[in-house]
């Protein structure tokens, strides 16, 4: 009698363990999917931001260059330097390999 109850409990325990293992695998798959979607959203946001910032950067470069030529003062071009770093970062984030390098 005790053997039958023990065997039933062991079978039940094995069933629970299998269920927990499957549930854990599903959670891992779901977490991976959510992380991939979040990364895709981040890349999409960066590409969209790059469109607007690229327009601003191009316009600022033209205006600052024109101002530097008219005033004959190359110091007017200094704001282009930090703007170019921001532009390059956003470009690398949207179209480059920044996220792969971060993961690595």
Image (cartoon, helix red, strand yellow):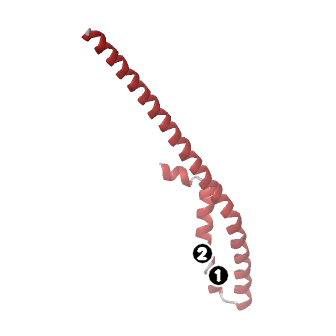
Q: Which residue is mark 2?
A: 81
Name which quarter of the figure residue 90 lies in. bottom right
In this picture, residue 102 sits left or right of residue 94:
left
- In the rendered image, residue 55, in percent from the top left (x then y), is placed at 73, 69
Counting every numbered tag in the picture gives 2
Looking at the image, the residue that sits furthest to the front is: 1
Say which quarter of the image contains residue 57: bottom right
Q: Residue at x 71, y 63 (%)?
A: 51
Q: In the image, is residue 85 above or below residue 71?
A: above
**Secondary structure beneath label 2:** helix
Mark 1: secondary structure: helix
**Whole-percent x, y for residue 5 in the image:** 30, 14
Q: Residue furthest bottom?
A: 71
Q: Is residue 49 above or below residue 70?
A: above
Q: Is residue 49 left or right of residue 3?
A: right
Specify few, some or many for label 1: CA neighbours under 10 Å numbering under 14, 14-19, or 20 or more.
some
| Residue at image point 70% right, 67% down | 52
Nearer the observer, 10 or 53: 10
Q: Which residue is more in the foreground, 18 or 69?
A: 18
Could you say which disc has been placed on residue 7 in the image?
A: none
Residue of label 1? 77
Image location (x, y in percent) of residue 29: 51, 37
Q: Which quadrant: the N terminus?
A: top left
The answer to whether the residues at label 1 and label 2 have Cβ atoms under 8 Å apart is yes
Q: Is residue 16 above or below residue 53?
A: above
Q: Could you give the CA–CA distance between mark 1 and mark 2, rounded to whole angstroms?
A: 8 Å
Q: Is residue 12 above or below residue 33?
A: above
Q: Position of residue 79 (x, y in %)?
A: 61, 79
Q: Nearer the viewer, residue 66 or 99?
A: 99
């Amino acid at each position: 009698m005790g053997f039958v109850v023990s065997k039933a409990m062991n079978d039940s325990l094995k069933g629970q363990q299998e269920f927990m293992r499957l549930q854990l695998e599903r959670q891992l798959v779901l977490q991976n999917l959510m992380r991939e979607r979040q990364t895709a959203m981040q890349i999409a946001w960066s590409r969209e931001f790059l469109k607007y910032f690229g327009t601003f950067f191009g316009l600022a470069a033209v205006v600052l260059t024109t101002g530097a030529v008219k005033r004959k003062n190359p110091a007017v071009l200094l704001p282009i330097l930090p703007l170019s770093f921001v532009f390059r970062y956003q470009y690398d984030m949207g179209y480059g390999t920044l996220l792969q390098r971060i993961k690595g």
